[in-house]
Structures are given as C-alpha cells and as structure tokens.
Image (spheres, rainbow, N blue to C red):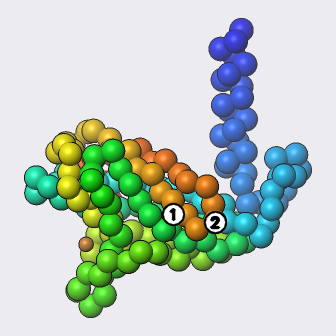
Amino acid sequence: MRRAVLTAAALAGALALTGCGSGAGTGADAGRDASKAELSVSSAYMPQPVSPDMAAGFLTLTNRGGGKDALTSVSSDVAGKVTMHSTVGGAMREKTSFAIPAHGRLVFKSGANHLMFEELKRSPKQGQHVTLKLTFAESGPLTVEMPVKSATYNPSTGH
Ligand code: CU
C-alpha cells in the first residue's frame, strides 16, 4: 500500500516536470516565482580520463525561468578541485563564473566550455558515475550524477 502511494507520487512528480513551462498548470505553478531562474541539468558525461590526475566533464544547464543566474562553482567527490574553462580561439581560459541567461542555456561540450576535474582521488572508469555539486549565484545547489563514458565518447552518436 505504502509502495503504491510512493509510486503515484513519483509519477505525479514526473508529469509535473514534463509539463513545466507550459503555464497551463494551476496548483503546481502557484508557488512559483516567474522572475526566478529554474535550472535543470542534462547531457552530463565524463569521458574516461586518460590522465591519472585530470579529467574533463560536460553538461547542459537549462533555465526555464524568467530570471538569469550564474554557475559560480563546481565540486566533486572524485576531485580535489573542479575548475570551469571556456575555450576561445583554441585557447582555454579558467573562469570563476558562467552566466545562465533567463529562458536560456549554458552548454559545456567537447571543444568548447568544459569542466576540469583536478587532483583526482580515484580514476573514474566507464560505466561508473561521479557526483558533482553545482553552486549558483541565485538558485540553490544542484547535485548531478555524471556517468563516465568511453574516452572517445561522442554525445551526437551516443558511443
Ligand atoms: Cu580546461
């Protein structure tokens, strides 16, 4: 009985997420502030690192809210520190903050913005997950389970 109730609640949650942003909802949207950022994470992965002490990571942050925000720091259980880099004209540059526009996206992908996991405490292997904590200027922190893919993983082909 208890299990059935939990499943129904989980299902309702999933439906609420799917319907997010349509503005058609009443109850679920009532507590929402349209001027605030509403962040979600997708397409997160780490290519299995070839270096024993450094790894890269990629993800997409989507903001469905009407307020801007900024990613201000990243930490992980597997790394002494995680730094954020942009790539401009082939040269990468460490940044302390990345803007997330209202109704927009912040994309970290191979060859462009990326996360760098430094001082690795263990060597992540394909099939495992690493845990990330994302901290923002405005929104509360998000925890991300980032899957480790092959060293040559290409998200557009899926392998
Ligand atoms: Cu870098």
List the residue tagged with mark 2.
138
Give residue 83's quadrant in the image: bottom left
For the image, the number of numbered tags is 2
Task: Tell me the residue at 34%/54% (across/down).
Answer: 45
Instruction: List x then y, in percent, for residue 25.
Output: 84, 51
- Viewed as shown, does residue 76 lie left or right of 127? right
The amino acid pointed to by label 1 is Leu
Question: Can residue 64 be seen from the camera position used here?
Answer: no
Give residue 107's quadrant in the image: bottom left
The label on residue 61 is 1
Q: Secondary structure at mark 2?
A: loop
Q: Is residue 56 above or below residue 110?
A: above
Image quarter for ligand 1: bottom left
Task: Tell me the residue at 70%/72% (across/down).
Answer: 67
Q: If the image is split into quadrants, where does the N terminus sit? A: top right
Between residue 97 and residue 126, name the one nearer to us: 97
How busy is the neighbourhood of tag 2: few (under 14 within 10 Å), some, or many (20 plus)?
some
Q: Residue furthest bottom?
A: 89
